[in-house]
Image: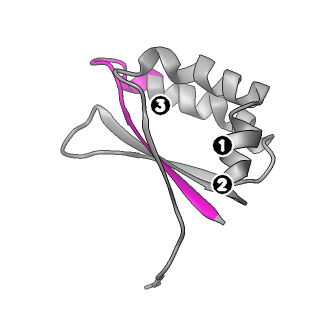
């Protein structure tokens, strides 16, 4: 399992539209091979900044299967017009966990 972390800055005044677009794109992610869930986080200090945290079975599930699919096209159609700049994307592997 890998985690994709996308930092996304949106255009001023488009925060609500972006959040609604992510909600509409939920089905596109859910249809994707290797998808295991996502969360959208909004920065408190920088309210135009978001982090989309997506769980994928493998790196290729995101970089190959999703990005070359119609689901990716649908995702970008829902939210791409809100981007102030291209998202910064990283992939991580969990090395330590803790629960309350």
Which callout, 3 or 1, points to the residue nearer the camera? Answer: 1
Residue density around tag 2, few if under 14, some if 14–19, many if 20 or more, within 10 Å? some
Q: Which residues are magenta?
A: 2-17
In the rendering, at what x and y percent does residue 40 appear?
Answer: 48, 45
Identify the residue under disc 3.
Answer: 19
Circles 3 and 1 in contact, beta carbons < 8 Å: no
Is 23 on the left-hand or right-hand side of 98? Answer: right
Identify the residue under disc 1.
Answer: 63
Q: Nearer the viewer, residue 86 or 46?
A: 86
In the image, residue 59 above or below residue 62: below
Q: Callout 2: helix, strand or loop?
A: helix
Q: Earlier in the sequence, mark 3 or mark 2?
A: 3
Q: CA distance from mark 3 to mark 1?
A: 23 Å
Circles 3 and 2 in contact, beta carbons < 8 Å: no
Q: Residue at x 73, y 49 (%)?
A: 61
In the image, residue 97 above or below residue 30: below
Q: Residue at x 59, y 51 (%)?
A: 38
Q: Nearer the viewer, residue 75 or 17?
A: 75
In the image, residue 76 above or below residue 31: above
In the rendering, at what x and y percent does residue 77 appear?
Answer: 61, 17
Q: Is 15 a magenta residue?
A: yes
Q: CA distance from mark 2 to mark 1?
A: 6 Å
Identify the residue under disc 2.
Answer: 59
Q: Is 23 a magenta residue?
A: no
Residue density around tag 3, few if under 14, some if 14–19, many if 20 or more, within 10 Å? some
Q: Earlier in the sequence, mark 3 or mark 1?
A: 3
Q: Residue furthest left?
A: 45
Quarter assignment of residue 25: top right
**Rendered-image quadrant of the C terminus:** bottom left
Is 34 on the left-hand or right-hand side of 43? Answer: right
Residue density around tag 1, few if under 14, some if 14–19, many if 20 or more, within 10 Å? few
Circles 2 and 1 in contact, beta carbons < 8 Å: yes
């Amino acid at each position: 399992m890998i985690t994709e972390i996308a930092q996304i800055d949106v255009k001023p005044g488009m925060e609500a539209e972006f959040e609604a677009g992510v909600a509409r794109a939920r089905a596109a992610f859910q249809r994707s091979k290797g998808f295991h869930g996502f969360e959208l986080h909004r920065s408190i200090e920088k309210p135009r900044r978001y982090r989309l945290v997506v769980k994928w079975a493998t790196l290729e599930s995101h970089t190959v299967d999703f990005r070359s699919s119609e689901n990716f096209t649908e995702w970008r159609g829902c939210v791409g017009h809100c981007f102030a700049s291209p998202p910064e994307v990283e992939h991580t592997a969990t090395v330590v966990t803790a629960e309350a």
